[in-house]
Image (cartoon, rainbow, N blue to C red):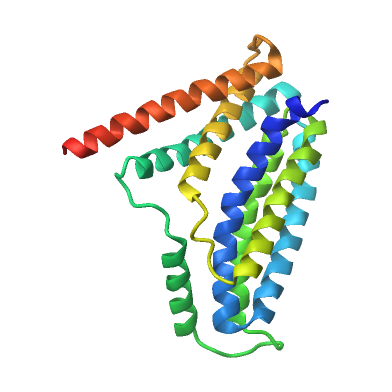
Amino acid sequence: MNWFELAPTVSAAFLASLVECVEAATILLAVGVVRGWRPALAGLAVGLLALAALVLALGPALARLPEQALQLFVGLLLLLFGMRWLRKAMLRGAGIIPLHDEDAIFRSETANLRLARAGERWGMDPAAFVAAFKAVLLEGVEVAFLVLAVAAGSPALIMPAAIGALAAAVLVAVVALAVHKPLAQVPENTLKFTVGVLISAFGIFWTGEGLGIAWPGHDLALLAIVAAVLLVALLGTRLAAGKEARA
């Protein structure tokens, strides 16, 4: 399997994970700044352990499903997941709903943490620990699902997809620690738009595989599907922006 075949899977896993990791990092920074880094890091560690257990349990379970049924199931889920991201990114791009603001989220989280009751239990701040744990678990579940889903058609793709997700997590962690503030400058809506296109294309591809469609060029057909979804999404965003301007 060469890089040309791996690129769509690795790119989708990396970009999707990048978005989710930025959102988790914002909450972890808020916890660390307001309530201390001990509960933030403890919540991060326990959240990662829970995610590892989930992946270890879910991976073999998915592998036992018939290949065609698995492709159809995962394809439909990816299509629904990708279209949800793409729809929001298109509406934000058209100016219909406001852009995602990491600075505002950071301010909101820090305000909530300051209002939360202070105290310790077993040498740990419960409110801070739970906030960090929930951020890692909730965002991480989406990452784990995406890694398993984009690689569902071939066990050989799971490791490249996982490497793409891990690279995104490491990149976000390094940058967040270096700047010590929310990553508000990340073009999140552009990332979500790109991820929405990629995930929707994967969903169409795997759904077709599950329905027994013989794609021309097989894996290469994925590139054509990506281009078609991108074209439709750009056109839809432009039409929506024009309608909003006339309203």
Q: Residue at x 72, y 50 (%)?
A: 167
Can I make out residue 167 in this image?
Answer: yes
Is residue 43 shown above or below 22? below
> Which residue ends up furthest to the left in the rendered image?
247
Estimate the x, y position of residue 106 in percent, counting from the top left. 48, 69
Q: How many marks?
A: 0
Is residue 236 shown above or below 189? above
Is residue 144 shown above or below 152? below
User: Which corner quadrant of the image does residue 75 belong to?
Assistant: top right
Is residue 119 shown above or below 209? below
Q: Is residue 90 left or right of residue 170?
A: left
Estimate the x, y position of residue 193 in percent, counting from the top left. 48, 39
For the N terminus, the quadrant is top right
For the C terminus, the quadrant is top left
Q: Residue at x 80, y 40 (%)?
A: 159
Can I make out residue 131 in this image?
Answer: no
Q: Is residue 235 left or right of residue 80?
A: left
Estimate the x, y position of residue 71 in percent, counting from the top left. 67, 26
Estimate the x, y position of residue 11 in percent, counting from the top left. 66, 37
Task: Give 77 or 99, whichever is nearer the viewer.
Answer: 99
Task: Give 158 or 127, whichever is nearer the viewer.
Answer: 158
Q: Is residue 142 left or right of residue 83?
A: right
Task: Give 71 or 161, whichever is nearer the viewer.
Answer: 161
